[in-house]
Amino acid sequence: MSKFRRRALLATLVTGLAGGTAWALGGRVRAQGGRVAAGPAPVPAPAPAGQKLKAVADDGWKMTKPGIRPATSDKRLNIAGYASAASVNVGQRINFHVTVADPGRYRVSLYRKGYYGAAEAGLMANSPMLDGVPQQVPAPQPGSGTIVCDWPASWGLTIPENWMSGHYLAVLTTEDGWRSYVPFVVRDDERPAELCVVVPTTTYQAYNLWPKDERQGKSLYYGYALNAATAKRELQPDARAVQVSFDRPYANAGRPANVDLDWAFAAWAEEAGYDLTFATSQDLHAGRIDPSRYAGLVFPGHDEYWSREMRQHATAALAAGTSLVFLSANNVYWHSRLPETADGQAGRLLTCYKSRGDEPGERVDRTCRWRDDTGPGDPEQRLLGVQFNGILDDPAPLVVRAQNHWFWAGTGVRDGDKIDDVVGGEADGWDPDLADGKQVLLSSSPYVTTSGDKKVQNTSLIETANGALVFAAGSLYWPRFLTQQGDPTIRRVTANLLNRVVANRRSTRV
């Protein structure tokens, strides 16, 4: 299996459309000698978010509601849409661009995702009933393969100043029950918070194959091309795009690949009482995140595509004393660019040529792996402490190391104990040739890659000279174990980590 095929398969691991999806996850620590241990639930101090509107829990967003039909077919496009921006600050306007298969009526409902119990979201606003009009699906642009929709704005609103920052969904529903999602983030740039959660929108778009129509859809992994042997158009790595646009819907009825990782963290952290604000990859790139306002930047999900500006801003934040917390794996892997569009719009294009040899520009600017000497030559371990080292077919246990470290406090674990299934999807490991600075490895977990290679996963923690922390979980699946279907030990150690990150900030509160 090619590396592009193996990597692209990850996009299909959790793109189920039903709200409230539960995962079969391990929930036990297996101790050496037969002992079973489980850590207590997280116990951070409460941190209210001020007079912000969170909304009342409402499960009306779910695809499983009676009469609702997920609009998963990109051949027909019963209803689909995209937002005018990946994120919007309170007080600013966001527009939604919508197409339908047949002229008819539909509504846009705005929900905030977070901790809302079984509902998983709260209803913030509804549009009036709108008249839907079919829009044209453009052909991929020659050379780059970019698909850019230029649909008119169908509806929009100015985000009220009292709306709480977070993950939002514009839920598009036709009168006859077809439904799709448009994800976006609401920011609150002027409000200081303990933690700023950075949503990996560049990686969402890199995996987006829209339109998934067996004809012309493209992502940075695949595109459709004619297979001479079968006389059918099939997904092929050589037909992938080198540039993708945010001016198009997401495939799978608008649900980005691995978005569940980010939603899981947000729900857990809000329930635990952390004071959060949210931003996106584009905001980190553009310098809209002021690290002095936060004790830490948290990257909960699969955050694979980083521009040079993103890395520079994260590095500067760390140097200024803001901690960096990476709760998944395979982060900062592809060097990419976020160029302006032809009409000067920022943050609407993502470029990554990968192995294609026709990219213009200097070597250090090439959009390949950060670690490649033919490109930037700056391995991600120099920032994270570990770096991507493999893909797993089957999850493996996380094997405890450094049992006396404060990270493991309150769990009762010992070196060699195994937490079932935590290492899954993708894993990071420590490269001794790149060792630098004060670092502790908190796990040492053997696993087997999809190609049969034996590797070791490591969870890493670095404490810098100025007291800031850099944490890398080293497993794609880590955030799923923060859910109630997950593992109490993972919940406890994640709380230990975040409590340490925010301790100085909380101590100054009146």
Image: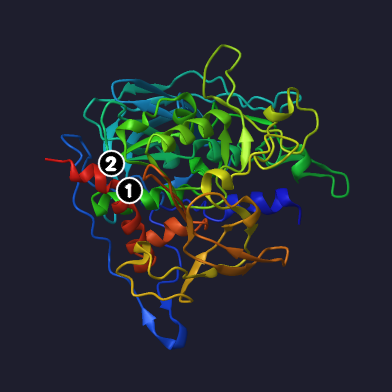
Q: Which mark is residue 367?
A: none
Who's the residue at 80% across and 32% down the image?
A: 357
Q: In terms of depth relative to the viewer, which is nearer, 467 or 285?
A: 467
Mark 2 neighbour class, 10 Å CA radius: few under 14, some 14 to 19, many 20 or more: many
Furthest residue toward bottom:
33
Contact flag, marks 2 and 1 (Cβ < 8 Å): yes
Q: Position of residue 329 (x, y in %)?
A: 53, 52
Query: Sequence-wise, which precedes: disc 2 or disc 1?
Result: 2
Furthest residue toward left:
510
Examine the image and state in which quarter residue 90 appears: top left
Furthest residue toward right:
229
Q: Quadrant of the N terminus?
A: bottom right
Mark 1 neighbour class, 10 Å CA radius: few under 14, some 14 to 19, many 20 or more: many
Identify the residue under disc 1: 501
Examine the image and state in which quarter residue 446 appears: bottom right
**For numbered disc 2, what is the local secondary structure?**
loop
Q: In terms of depth relative to the viewer, which is nearer, 134 or 441?
A: 441
Q: Does the rendering let one see residue 15?
A: yes
Q: Position of residue 395 (x, y in %)?
A: 56, 67
Q: Which mark is residue 194?
A: 2
Left or right? Give the position of 67 relative to 233: left
